[in-house]
Image (cartoon, grey):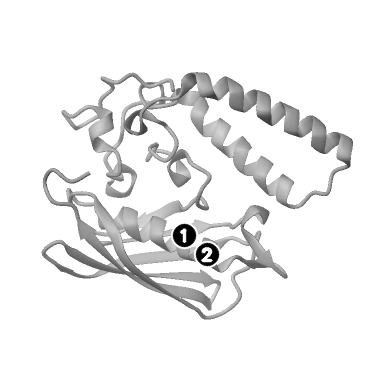
Amino acid sequence: MGGEADATVTGHAEPWETRIGVPESFTGSTPGTESELPGGEAWGPLVEALRGFLDDLAGSLPGQERVAALTRQIEEWSADLRQDQVPEMRQAFGHRVDLHGRGQVMAPAFVLTDRGQDSVEGTVTFGRYFLGGHGAVHGGAVALLFDEVLGRLSDTSSRPPGRTAGLTVNFRAVTQVGKPLTVRARFEEESGRKRYLVGEIWDGDVLCADARALFLGLRAGQD
């Protein structure tokens, strides 16, 4: 990982690692320059290349020789990366809130386009990697996107990080792979540690799915 343990986020006195899970990219404040953040400037292009690889892999049927060659290459890359393992709070994967998708490939990349006081709007394009069947996105990937976007919004405006306590997803129409979709999320209600949020995925004027989630803010000392 390229970031150092004492790297700080612009506008915050705490080290970068203590801000993990707090999505500054949703609040408008700007993290430090890419060179100061975990993974440095090269992390974003690496993650985008990996996303493309996973989509290409999902949609391909290579010959056995190519499969064997790819397997050897991936095993070599894994061996190299095992030499660079770090504790969770120092890893770049999933912690780069300055990048679309937080610099990870577990969930589809949500691209923020508009930010309200307690709401966000953006776009997502589910790649072939998230295909369920017959051109439709896997239902679990839809739920994962809602958990990602609603969870990040839940942590904004100086709120302590929260954990998912409940998530209900309603599938209204087919969510198509490879098509730019609109995602909307907002706070519905907040009471003490409980935060209720709702979200929608739209394909033009067609509602593909909606969700309601409950997040619980962590108490002091919880991690």
Whether residues under marks 1 and 2 lie with C-beta atoms below 8 angstroms apart, the answer is yes
| Kind of residue at disc 2 | Gly
Q: Amino acid at mark 1?
A: Leu
Residue appearing at x 69%, y 68% in the figure: 133
Asked if residue 124 shows in the view, the reply is yes
Please tell me how crowded label 2 is: few (under 14), some (14-19), or many (20+) other residues with Cα within 10 Å: few
Return the x and y of residue 12 as percentages of the image width and height: 18, 32
Depth order, front residue of 197/114: 197
Residue 9 visible, this orientation: no
Locate residue 168, reporting x and y percent: 39, 74
* Residue marked by disc 2: 140
Q: How many marks?
A: 2
Res 223 → quadrant: top left
**Front residue (pair 180, 188):** 188
Instruction: Quickly name the residue at label 1.
Output: 144
The residue located at (62%, 36%) in the rendering is: 49
